[in-house]
Structure formats: C-alpha cells, structure tokens
C-alpha cells in the first residue's frame, strides 16, 4: 500500500490537488472536510454538531473525525492506498491514524506539506466563497479563525511526521499544474525507493 497525507493550511490547495493525485496514482481519497459536508447535507446528528463548529472556523472534536476515518478504512479493504486530505489536524488524530494503519500492517509513506502565504490563503478562500456556497468561506473573520486554528493546533502535526523523516515541503503558490507536477515528482521518487 502507498499512503500519503496532503498537509497545509485552509486554502493551500489540498482539495484541488487531491482530485488530480487520486486519479493519477489510483488512491482512495479520504477528505474529512468532504465527509463532514456530506453529513451536513444529509442532516445527520453528526452533521448538525459539526456545522456549528465549522461555521465558526473551529475544528470538529477528535473523536468524531477519528471515528469517520476508522469507518472509511474499514469500508475500503481493497484500496491500493489512501490519500488523507485535511486529516490529521491534531496530534491526537495523528496518533490515532498511526494506530489504525498499524492494524492494517501499513503506515504513512510521505507527508506533502503545501506552503502558502496568509494573504494568498485569504484571497483564495474569499474568492471560493463567492461561488461555493460554503458558509465557512464567506467572510474574513471566519477565515481568520480557521487559519488561527491551523496555527494553534494543526501546524505542529508536521513535527510528528518530521521525527520519522516523512515530511516534504512544497511551495503551494503558482499554477495548479506547476504544483501538481512538483507533488507528482516527490511521490514518484518515493515510489521508486519503495521498490
Ligand atoms: P476542509 O474541507 O479540509 O477545507 P479547507 O482546508 O478549506 O480546504 P482546502 O485546503 O482543501 O481547499 P483548497 O485549497 O483546495 O475543512 C473545512 C472545515 O472542516 C475545517 O475548518 C474544520 O472545521 C472541519 N474539519 C475538516 N477536517 C477536520 C479534522 N480532521 N479535524 C477537525 N475538523 C475538521 O481550495 C481553496 C481555493 O483555492 C479553491 O477555490 C481553489 O480553486 C483555490 N486554489 C487551489 N489551488 C490554487 C492555486 N494554485 N492558485 C490559485 N487558487 C488555487
């Protein structure tokens, strides 16, 4: 199996690049943001709880997202590998993911961390808010809270994987194609060293 984490602040291009990477490398895409938005659309109890937090730019409790990932892993026993997008976002989530993958006798192969300036993040998210209907993209104050949550709770998750030399930083500024090419080069290099 080949498992990768696409890491970075809100608006850094995780969702955008994930779509292209899963198609090229035949990986199963697990986006906690997408799963949560689908729970909200379906009006589930979990969705209702998540919506009020997401609308304030806060993270959803660890137990909720860890449960979602556990269930997604169980439902995809034949996957060739997973692309984790927007997960893990806390150290507790990273520890849980390590344990869940160890149960499947596998682990994370690489963490690709996208780096984008704060002004560019805000610009992209406000721009997406014009058309996406996403309530967490509509104003600068919610976007600011999401970036603060990232800095407070999520940025340190990179250290968890740095200890085992799995993090590669990539500039997330430039065209979607340019960034995609850089991500592909890193993955191909990693796949070669696995053989
Ligand atoms: P996510 O769905 O993960 O949302 P995101 O971080 O905003 O998305 P992403 O980074 O993928 O967006 P992209 O750059 O692709 O999370 C939403 C919320 O869900 C969180 O705030 C939290 O409340 C909750 N949540 C999710 N996972 C959780 C977890 N594990 N634990 C707890 N809570 C969790 O796209 C942004 C825009 O940039 C797009 O419009 C795109 O077109 C544009 N763009 C992309 N690349 C570009 C480029 N190179 N140049 C110009 N524009 C670009």
Image: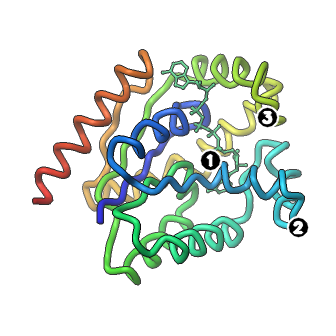
Instruction: Name the quadrant containing residue 193.
Output: bottom left
Determine crowd level at label 2: few under 14, some 14-19, many 20+ residues with C-alpha closer than 10 A.
few
Q: Position of residue 46 (x, y in %)?
A: 82, 65
Residue on which the image places disc 3:
134
Please name the residue that numbered disc 1 is placed on.
152
Q: Residue drawn at (32%, 54%), measured in percent from left and top?
A: 162
The answer as to whether callout 1 falls within 8 Å of ligand 1 is no
Residue 45's tag is: 2
Compared with residue 99, is residue 15 higher up or lower down, i.e. above or below?
above
The residue at 48%/70% (across/down) is 97
Q: Nearer the viewer, mark 1 or mark 2?
A: 2
Residue 152 in percent (x, y) is at: 62, 47
Q: Which labelled disc corresponds to residue 135? A: none
The answer to whether the residue bearing label 3 lies less than 8 angstroms from the nearest atom of ligand 1 is yes
Mark sitting earlier along the chain (1/2): 2
Determine crowd level at label 3: few under 14, some 14-19, many 20+ residues with C-alpha closer than 10 A: some
Q: Earlier in the sequence, mark 1 or mark 3?
A: 3
Left or right of residue 159, residue 165 in this image = left
Q: Is residue 65 left or right of residue 4?
A: right
Q: Secondary structure at mark 2?
A: helix
Is residue 178 toward the left or the right of residue 94 in the image? left
**Quarter that holds the N terminus:** bottom left
């Amino acid at each position: 199996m080949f498992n990768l984490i696409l890491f970075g602040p809100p608006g850094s291009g995780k969702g955008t690049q994930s779509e292209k990477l899963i198609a090229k490398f035949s990986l199963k895409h697990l986006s906690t943001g997408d799963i949560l938005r689908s729970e909200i659309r379906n009006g589930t109890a979990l969705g209702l709880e998540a919506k009020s937090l997401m609308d304030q730019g806060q993270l959803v409790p660890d137990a909720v997202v860890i449960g979602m990932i556990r269930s997604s892993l169980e439902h995809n026993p034949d996957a060739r590998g997973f692309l984790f997008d927007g997960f893990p976002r806390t150290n507790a989530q990273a520890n849980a993911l390590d344990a869940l993958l160890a149960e499947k006798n596998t682990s994370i192969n690489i963490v690709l961390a996208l780096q984008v300036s704060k002004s560019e993040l805000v610009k992209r998210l406000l721009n997406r808010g014009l058309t996406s209907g996403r309530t967490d993209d509509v104003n600068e104050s919610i976007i600011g809270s999401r970036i603060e949550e990232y800095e407070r709770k999520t940025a340190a998750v990179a250290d968890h994987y740095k200890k085992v030399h799995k993090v590669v930083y990539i500039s997330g500024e430039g065209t979607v194609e340019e960034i995609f090419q850089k991500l592909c080069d890193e993955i191909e290099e990693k796949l070669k060293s696995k053989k």
